[in-house]
Amino acid sequence: MLGGLLLVLICSALNMVSPYLSGIIVDKVIVNQHVSILPILIISIVSATFLKAILRYTFLMNFERVSQNLIFDLKSEIYNKLQEQDFDFFDKTNTGDIMTKMTGDIDMVRHFVAFVIYNVFDNATNFIFAVTLMFTINYKFTLILLAITPLTFIFALKLSTNVRASFFAIRAQFSKLNSVVQENISGNRLVKAFAKEDFEKEKFNKINHGFKEKNLASAAIWEKYLPVLDSLAGSMVVLMILIGGILVINKSLTIGQLVTFNSLIFALNNPMRMIGWLINDIQRFSTSGEKIMDLLRIKPTIKNHKAKVKKEKLNGNIEFINVSFSYGDEEVLKDINLKVSPGETIAIIGPTGSGKSTLVSLICRFYDSTEGEILIDDINIKDIDVNILRERISTAMQDIFLFSDTIEGNIAYGVPDASMERIQWVASMADAHEFIQNMPEGYDTIIGERGVGLSGGQRQRIALARALLKNPDILILDDTTSSVDMETEHKIHKTLNSYFKDKTTFIIAHRISSVKNADKILVLNNGSIVEQGTHAELLHLRGQYFSVYINQLGDFDNIDAKVVG
């Protein structure tokens, strides 16, 4: 950057050569007939022009290279920062805003570095060199020409102050526009299923109209100040011709000196003409830069303590001690106390919103508990290295995400170097091997974005195979078989029984058939454990679990016989 600015400085100095020598040609050669110096003067002008062209090309390429390197590093830094963020960050930040930072805001930074910086410096140095040269020729004439610059500065300052708020508004509206488009593309199947295309068009048009209005409001500010700035710049030419002519007539200025002044007027005029546009770009950069810095300043709430414990293997002994969790002002879990022995299978059922997924998310430290503590192998999970903790825990989440990759690549996501035999083995355990083999390219079949083209049950089974491949110490299955039929579910659980033996396993489900063989079943309601025990124990309690069992069984006339059976 400094090297490029140095070249700009040299070019600005070379810009003075041609106007200065042109004045000498008029006075010395044309007026006083000193023709002998003409070749030297012409060679000097041509040489300066040629050298200036080379240097200008060099610094333009230099600034472009610097800007591209900068945005490469900046994109990497932002992406790395996103990887560090917790669930809480993505819960509160919409995708459109993130994409705006990664695209429009970063491009504004590139434009600022590649174009705005050198233009500001170029105009400033040209102005300073030109004024200095003019002062050496005729300081009174120079002061007259500079008389209008304070007025230009005042208007430029007012423009800068007023336009800043409008750019913040434009940027916020652009973020909303990105969010609407992103959501519509991601949810296009839902839109078509509900025949809401017209509604979505109207919603987009409303946001798009808002974006247009914000830009028009910004343009209105320009309409107010730009004509004034242009007029002030243009008036300098009028002053130069009028006052300069009078000075020549009065012999206070030679014709050659007037030619030099006339040739240098660009160095005074251009900055005043450009100042509005440059302020515009600087303010846009400032707005985008602040948004990027806001993102880079965000620190993850889930982080390692200095005295972190690096456990290469977890035994799977888990204990919740008076654990509560609140999301904002909403209390999600209340005073959870639970002990889980290594190798136990814990099932969790309860109505939607009862806190089932949140409870297992605390084990992975996707969130930290608001109160109480969670121990794994008698160590507070906040003291365990978070990366090792998550490496030794495998989760098949309720919200299944599959990458636009092969089926093999999706299953092997957690263990990229896994053998094909191992991948096929876990696929068989998840009852996915058969349908995968029947696909056009088998395990090499490319899955569409988010698993488009696969049924819900197929996506769940691939996600289950992905979780099993890690061979974790703790396995969490969050409603993993909800989209498969009862027969397939029975087959999967039967196959997994041997797999669960040496692993602490959490199963979240709504079907009694998925949880009845668990070592312990937890019934959650409104964030509290209202019942816990084995299948038989909970049936004899005749509480919430019993009600779910009867509702799913559907035979109210023979309840006692069914329970005994």
Image (cartoon, rainbow, N blue to C red):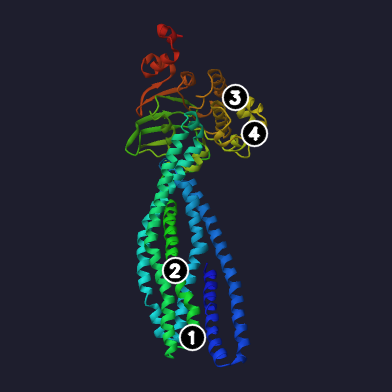
Q: Residues within 10 Å of mark 2 (few under 14, many from 20)?
A: many
Q: Which mark is in front, 4 or 3?
A: 4
Q: What kind of residue is marked 2?
A: Arg
Q: Earlier in the sequence, mark 1 or mark 4?
A: 1
Helix, strand or loop at mark 2: helix
Q: Residues within 10 Å of mark 1 (few under 14, many from 20)?
A: many
Q: Earlier in the sequence, mark 4 or mark 3?
A: 3
Whole-angstrom CA distance, mark 2 to mark 3, is 71 Å
The reply to whether residue 407 is visible in this rendering is: yes
The mark found on residue 296 in the picture is none
Whole-angstrom CA distance, mark 2 to mark 4, is 59 Å
- Residue drawn at (42%, 81%), measured in percent from left and top? 242
> Label 4 belongs to which residue?
445
Q: Residues within 10 Å of mark 3 (few under 14, many from 20)?
A: many
Q: Residues within 10 Å of mark 4 (few under 14, many from 20)?
A: some
Q: What kind of residue is marked 3?
A: Asp
x%, y% of residue 465?
58, 30
Q: Using the image, determine if residue 477 lies above or below residue 12.
A: above
Q: What kind of residue is marked 1?
A: Gln
Q: Are marks 1 and 2 in contact (CB under 8 Å)?
A: no
Helix, strand or loop at mark 1: helix
x%, y% of residue 112?
48, 61
The reply to whether residue 364 is visible in this rendering is: no
Q: Using the image, determine if residue 205 lies above or below residue 359.
A: below
> Label 3 belongs to which residue?
431
- Classify residue 50 by image quadrant: bottom right
Image check: 289 left or right of 14?
Answer: left
x%, y% of residue 189?
51, 32
Q: What kind of residue is marked 4?
A: Thr
x%, y% of residue 380?
41, 39
Whole-angstrom CA distance, mark 1 to mark 4, is 78 Å
Q: Which mark is in front, 2 or 4?
A: 2
